[in-house]
Image: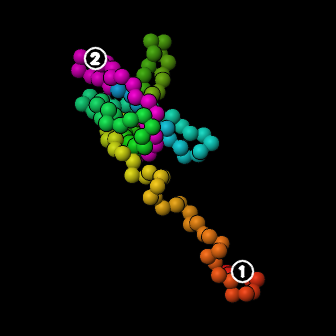
């Protein structure tokens, strides 16, 4: 799975055990501009330094795996957890800035010639 967004936060590396370490980071994902989503990802083991290449606010593309697991409490209650485990992070090629083509065509009304009648051209 792949998601594009703006790097919002980077957390510190957590040494969970002698042989396992992880690091979280957050991406601001905007599918609907009225409701931006802050999505938390996790890097594990030798990939924890991958996020150091990027600055807060930079647009990135994250390739990740969706992980899920079940946990049973001492009282016997089952709970379910999800993790978005990132395995590749790269600079987003979708810059939405200068040089990128507009998503919808833009027409200048003065460029549209008229043949004199008031009928629509379609």
Magenta part, dominant SS: strand
* Range of residues picked out in magenta: 1-22
Q: Taking 97 as reference, is 116 left or right?
A: right
Outermost residue toward the right in this view: 118
| Nearer to us: label 1 or label 2 | 1
Residue at the outermost front position = 110
Q: Secondary structure at mark 1?
A: loop
Determine whether, in the image, residue 60 is placed left or right of residue 46: right
Which label's residue is closer to the chain start, 1 or 2? 2
Say the numbered circle drawn on residue 120.
1
Q: Is residue 7 magenta?
A: yes
Q: Residue at x 30, y 30 (%)?
A: 48
Does 11 appear in magenta? yes
- Whole-number angstrom distance, CA of label 1 to CA of label 2: 71 Å
**Residue 82 screen position, x and y as percent:** 44, 31
Residue at horizontal 43 percent and vertical 43 percent from the top: 59
* Res. 67 in view: no
Q: Is residue 119 above or below residue 36?
A: below
User: Label 2 belongs to which residue?
Assistant: 17
Colour setting = rainbow
């Amino acid at each position: 799975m792949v998601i594009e967004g703006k790097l919002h936060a980077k957390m510190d590396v957590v040494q969970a055990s002698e042989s396992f370490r992880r690091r979280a980071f957050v991406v601001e994902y905007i599918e609907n501009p009225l409701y931006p989503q802050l999505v938390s990802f996790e890097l594990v083991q030798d990939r924890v330094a991958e996020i150091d290449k990027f600055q807060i606010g930079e647009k990135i593309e994250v390739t990740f795996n969706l992980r899920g697991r079940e946990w049973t409490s001492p009282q016997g209650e089952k709970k379910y957890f999800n993790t978005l485990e990132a395995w590749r992070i790269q600079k987003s090629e979708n810059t939405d800035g200068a040089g990128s083509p507009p998503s919808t065509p833009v027409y200048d009304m003065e460029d549209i010639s008229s043949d004199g009648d008031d009928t629509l051209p379609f």
